[in-house]
Image: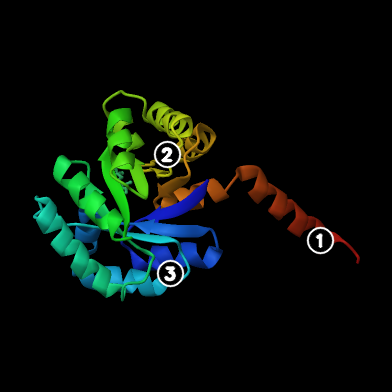
Amino acid sequence: MKFFIDTANVEAIKKAYKVGILSGVTTNPSLVAKEGVKFEERIEEILQAVPSVESVSAEVTPDAVTAEEMIAQANELIKINNYDKNITIKLPMTLEGLEACRYLADKGVKTNVTLIFTVNQALLAARAGATYVSPFLGRLDDISEDGVQLVSKVAELFRIHNLDAQIIAASVRHPDHVTRVAMAGAHIATVPFAVIEQIAKHPLTDQGIAKFAADWKGSSR
Ligand code: E4P
């Protein structure tokens, strides 16, 4: 399973990129709004910060409702990346979003269909040519459903029918989500930087480092 970072904060993106574990970035209108910056400018900054990742998801804004409006926005976003391949147009899971997805996929543009909450939605997105589909596990857990189970079922469905779309486990809230979606067959987990920090840590690792340091200091060498 690959890691994407789920944020529009450039400092967090740079930190994760430097560690060398990052394959992509996802953003959404809420994450960009939190930064208080201009959307297109932030996408450009992100693209410059992570030149070698496979995908940077830029989501069409909520005022693009029809497929035509989404495609028009996508065409502007693609220009920011100078038509390079790593910009990915993130589209909502609606019939209009699917129509835009099919259009863009046929033009060779990467797409990420977002806000997926059922297996059927994932199947539709894959059939519309989505490069990535994003089931939101945390938000399902929030309403007492099982987000990891959704990821597991989508992975099984894609295996059975040889569908190429990659599953991005999204709305990942804690380390256990990461382990469980990796075991469930997600191709990618998109995670906040705080979760990357959490999964890198273990108290026994810290204790071990402290003990090595203490023993090293006390030895005669
Ligand atoms: C993914 O692409 C979304 O940006 C994100 O994972 C949503 O997470 P949330 O449910 O924690 O807002």
Against 71, is 171 above or below?
above
Q: Secondary structure at mark 2?
A: loop
Q: Which residue is mark 2?
A: 163
* Gap in angstroms between the C-alphas marked 1 and 2: 54 Å
Q: Which of the two discs, 1 and 2, labels the residue nearer the N terminus? A: 2
Q: Which of 129 and 62 lies nearest the eye of the viewer?
A: 129
Where on the picture, by quarter, is residue 209? bottom right
Against 77, is 94 above or below?
above
CB at mark 3 closer than 8 A to ligand 1?
no
Residue name at image x 43 percent, y 54 percent = 4
Against 151, is 204 above or below?
below
Horizontal and vertical percent position of residue 94: 17, 41
Horizontal and vertical percent position of residue 150: 38, 29
Q: Which residue is mark 1?
A: 216
Q: Amino acid at mark 2?
A: Leu
Residue name at image x 48 percent, y 33 percent = 159
